[in-house]
Image (spheres, helix red, strand yellow):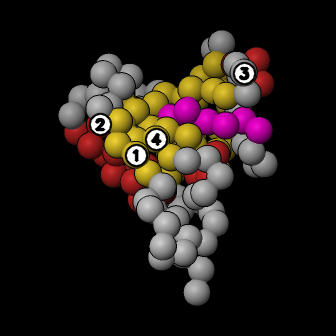
Amino acid sequence: MATISVAPYLIRAYHQWMEDSGLTPHILVDCSKEGVIVPSPYIQQGKIVLNIASEAASALVISNETVSFKARFDGKTQTISVPTSAILTIYAGENGEGMFFEADTQNKEQDNDKKPNLTLLD
């Protein structure tokens, strides 16, 4: 049986906690991953930081496969779609608190002998 990644569940939980705490949730995205749809002029060194706060991201959906929403870049509305496996971290813009995800391990089956692949950031 394939193991379901815990990452999307943690992304939803951290997003809700940040919003409830009055913090601004951001995600750092690895743009080299297949399926990432973001405005290319904003990609720096193969990555992009996206504000996924309710005020910035309309129609936000955090599913087990993707994070998708509409956001404005240079005054133009863009549709953003990011596979959850491309999300490197979710953090609060105000204090950096959040969680880092190891990039290449989210969608692989994990055997029971491995240590957890997630690290809390202080």
- Relative to 31, say whether 104 is above or below: below
The secondary structure making up most of the magenta span is: strand
Residues tagged 2 and 3 counted as in contact (Cβ below 8 A): no
Residue highlighted by disc 4: 100
Q: Earlier in the sequence, mark 4 or mark 3?
A: 3
Res 119 label: 1
Measure the alpha-carbon separation of dots 4 and 3. 18 Å
Query: Disc 1, disc 4: CB below 8 Å?
Result: yes
Residue 67 seen in this snapshot: no
Q: Secondary structure at mark 2?
A: helix
Disc on res. 75: none
Amino acid at the residue labelled 1: Thr
Tell me the SS state at disc 4: strand
Q: Nearer the viewer, mark 2 or mark 3?
A: 3
Instruction: Name the residue that disc number 3 marks.
Output: 45
Q: Tag 2: residue type?
A: Met
Residue at (35%, 43%) from the top-left corner?
120
Residue in front for this viewpoint, 47 or 16 = 47
Q: Position of residue 86 (x, y in %)?
A: 64, 45
Image coordinates for residue 54, horizontal then vertical, percent: 40, 35
